[in-house]
Image (cartoon, rainbow, N blue to C red):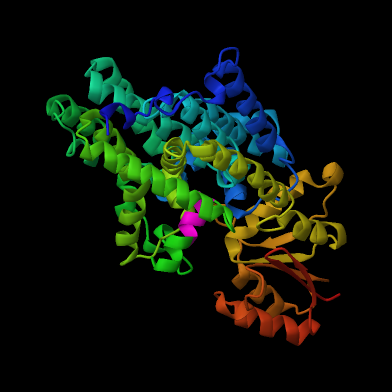
Amino acid sequence: MPVASALPLADQAFGPTPVNRPGVPVRLILVLLTIAGAWLRLSHLGAKSLWLDEGATVALARASWQHFAWIWWHGEANLQTIYFLLMRGWIHFGSSEAWIRSLSALFGIASIPLMYVVARKFTGLTWSLAAAALLAFNPTHIFYSQEARSYTLAILLVLLSTYFFVRAVEDGRMRDWALWTAISAAGFYSHDFVALVLLAQAASLLLKSPPVRWGRAILCGLIIFAAALPGLTYVFRASPENLHFIWMPRPSVKEFWHLAMFLGSGGIKIALWMVLWGAGLATIIRAHRVGATKEAWRGALLLLWAVLPAVLIALLSLRHPMFLQRYMIFSLPATVLLAAIGASILPKWRIGILLVIVLCAANIRSVVKEYHKPREDWRGATAAVLSSAAPGDAVVFFPFYTRIMLDYYSGQHADNNTPPLHVFAPAYYDGGEDVTNLLQALDKDPRHFRHVWILMADHGTRMEIFDFGAATQTKLQSIYGAPAVQKFDDIDVLEYGK
């Protein structure tokens, strides 16, 4: 087989394709794909309640600079620094759910044309457009484009990092090495797990033939490492419970399968993704066998980008379970590009293009179904309390840090006409009364509070598993009797004294 048919795959090697016919401008198709992707990401942006992690984003955005610096050193602000800094400015222009999430949506939209630009380093025009289309209609990318967290910003920076990495390695220009260094350091501070993609890039250099000029590569790598050191030290400074939680899964065959569906799609669509991924892998192997050195290295880079982060997290999870799918979302562009390359070697009856179109069309239904399906309905739960509570009622949270959701939705409540409540939960990393103070108050005066409201996350969880949960339940039931219970998505609201 001729080397020309290996990676990057020239469209003409397989005959004319629709986007290469005269009169069909590639830029117009890319613009239309970007518009379609923007519509999917901006539609119903405020339809769902914020969930806990998004509430933390808002709390960090509103914290004083002194408080923010303390949380950066001791807490999760360290993990997504750039995004939180941007949000601190963004939130001055609005505080609705839709506005708060729109920053992530913009990063997600910008990634669509950038996906095409990066794909051109690996394949031809048609299949670069296919990669942009698969990202534009990807349910996972759309889902995280509608979440007020840093994932889409990190994906955008990973794409930029990869683009300049390929240019730097192959062309050797110092400007490209400098841009790769700066963007990669920024990528780490958009989410610390981007470091795993940078390790995949570094590992690919070991497979480069002819060898890369190691002097510049090592120098730039050391600069990235030095820039990342303040953030890396968090791993040693943070308490274990801030790094991983008991509910985080361990790696298993089942979890890897769930990861594949997370990056691709569920149902029958995952079978189509597997076909495309298999074909893409075959293309890369073929490039290696025919001795296409440049294409073989790019293929190795792509596979390492797709696979190595999951492997490394799996190894880390053998000691401290943290095999969360969203921690591996930064491999999503690689899996999309691998599928697009796979489509390029299925020219018979235009099967490759057909599979891409079918996947994009089928994904729309999955996306629309998710628009109104909240992870946690804090909007409904807090509205139930704020609309029914009497002034001076006590409010308790299990776990205590979910108090930030009431803080946010109190400000969003209709006319901001919320009753003054006695909240027994520390403010966000800022101290305050807790459930033990409630128990002490009830010991002194069992009827001090007309009502006691409990908001408990993790639907179906028993109060007894939380610190002082059993004591609180026993005390409240002895005074008020059984509570009235309202159930929301992943939230229980208990009203004592109804």
Looking at the picture, does residue 465 appear above or below residue 225? below
Q: Nearer the viewer, residue 307 or 431?
A: 307
Q: Nearer the viewer, residue 159 or 397?
A: 159
In this rendering, would 73 be left or right of 410? Answer: left
Q: Main secondary structure of the magenta part?
A: helix
Q: Residue at x 44, y 35 (%)?
A: 344
Residue segment shown in magenta: 258-264
Q: Residue at x 50, y 49 (%)?
A: 273
Q: Is residue 380 above or below residue 207?
A: below
Q: How far across and down, in percent of the image, does residue 85 sit?
A: 51, 33
Q: Is residue 331 visible?
A: yes
Q: Judge left or right: residue 193 versus residue 51.
A: left
Image x and y of residue 250, in percent? 40, 67
Question: Is residue 72 in view from this perspective?
Answer: no
Residue 212 part of the magenta segment: no
Q: What is the number of callouts on the image?
A: 0
Within the image, what quadrant is residue 285 found in? Answer: top left
Q: List x then y, in percent, for residue 117.
A: 45, 24
Q: Quadrant of residue 145?
A: top right
Q: Is residue 471 above or below residue 15?
A: below
Question: x and y percent of residue 221 in the render?
Answer: 22, 33
Horizontally, is 400 left or right of 186 in the view?
right
Viewer-nearest residue: 474 or 156: 156
Where is the N terminus found, in terms of image quarters? top left
Q: Quadrant of the C terminus?
A: bottom right
